[in-house]
Image (spheres, coloured by chain):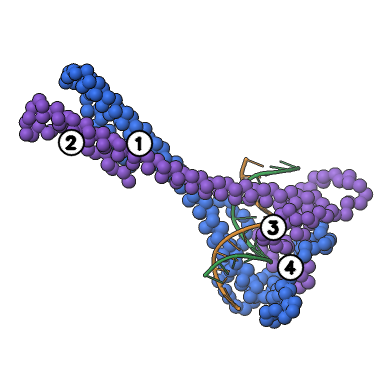
Chain colours: A blue, B purple, C orange, D green
Amino acid sequence: MSKQPQQKLTNTDQNGVSVIQSQAHSVANSTGATAGLQQVPQLVPVSPGGGGKATPPSKMKKTNMDKDSEEYRQRRERNNLAVKKSRMRSKQKAQDTQQRVNELKEENERLEAKIKLLSKELSVLKDLFLEHAHNLADNVQPATTATVTPGDLCNNNNNNQ
Amino acid sequence: MSKQPQQKLTNTDQNGVSVIQSQAHSVANSTGATAGLQQVPQLVPVSPGGGGKATPPSKMKKTNMDKDSEEYRQRRERNNLAVKKSRMRSKQKAQDTQQRVNELKEENERLEAKIKLLSKELSVLKDLFLEHAHNLADNVQPATTATVTPGDLCNNNNNNQ
DNA sequence: AGACATTGCGCAATCC
DNA sequence: CGGATTGCGCAATGTC
């Protein structure tokens, strides 16, 4: 959804002239408001100084900065594609991460439940032992007076998944 | 640190046609309105004759798409700000999510360790219990196959992923 | 050194 | 009307 008028000429290469249609109007270009004020200092590959490394042909940067250049267009298109891909991946990753959080949260709950269960079991068992110790100490042997039914301890571990 | 001068230059015709306009002008750059960089001046010559601009009931769409329009520039700037903010937030959120994953993973390990411990404890106690039961059984009825204690039901807690 | 990947940013459409 | 989102293209930069 969210479709917007956008022409996606997937011109898979094609030498010769075409595609590039230039519509003259809409001259909106130069940053009008910015009446060419102080421009940010552009970092320049200066360095030669005292004969440093071999400064390669210090030509102008990209002699063909011409947007008309076919090569330029080609590069742009490629980059646009790459950008799209990258963003898609990024988004996907974020989504995955979010999902991971959910999964981990779920598992955490599960584990905590299990801990609770085990703790309870342990507690019961310990009580049982204590009680028994009592009985022994009292020199009494009422067989199973207490509610010592091992069954309670055994019917557990019912969690799966 | 990665600040780069940048220039804007976009054109997307409302028609949906990607207009490629080429203007072989010099590489005049401007507007470095990049994050927290100076670049304060940004005023356009105020409209002469005061500002009694009555919003014309324009039926036409965007008659004033003029980039020169002060209003336009203002809107753009505002939007740019909003965009920046939004993106910042988005990024922050992603980061937080990632961190959450890490935290959850850590906690998970912690919980699992605890489970392991509890399980072990439980196991030991149960064994003790069984042993004791055996003793009792031996005293009461020395049957050979009397080892049919409920233990069989209990030796289970050893399953974890 | 060329190609693809990332990233910051501006623009415009759209959502709310 | 105005901020918030989002898709997209551009250019600088990073990485291989």
- State whether discs 3 and 4 lie on one chain: no
Q: Is residue D12 above or below residue A97?
A: below
Task: Choose the circle earlier in sequence order: 1 or 4.
Answer: 4
Residues at marks 1 and 2, CA–CA distance in whole angstroms: 22 Å
**Point 41% across, 42% down: residue:** B110
- State whether discs 1 and 3 lie on one chain: no
> Which of the chains bears the disc numbered 2?
B
Which numbered marker is on residue B152? 2
Q: Quadrant of the C terminus of chain A?
A: top left
Give x and y (percent) for residue B48.
Answer: 91, 51
Q: Residues within 10 Å of mark 2 (few under 14, many from 20)?
A: few
Q: Quadrant of residue A46?
A: bottom right
Q: Secondary structure at mark 3?
A: loop
- Could you say which is closer to the camera, residue B40 or residue A54? A54
Given the image, on which type of amino acid does mark 1 rest?
Answer: Lys
Q: Is residue A149 above or below residue C14?
A: above
Q: Residues within 10 Å of mark 3 (few under 14, many from 20)?
A: few
Left or right relative to A99: residue B60: right
> Would residue B135 be visible to someone looking at this image?
yes
> Which of the chains bears the disc numbered 3?
B
Which residue is labeled 3 in the image?
A: B14
Left or right relative to A19: residue B119: left
Left or right relative to B139: residue B28: right
Given the image, on which type of amino acid does mark 2 rest?
Answer: Asp
Residues at marks 2 and 4, CA–CA distance in whole angstroms: 79 Å
Left or right relative to B84: residue A159: left
Q: Is residue A112 above or below residue B46?
A: above
Which numbered marker is on residue A43? 4
Q: Quadrant of residue A11?
A: bottom right
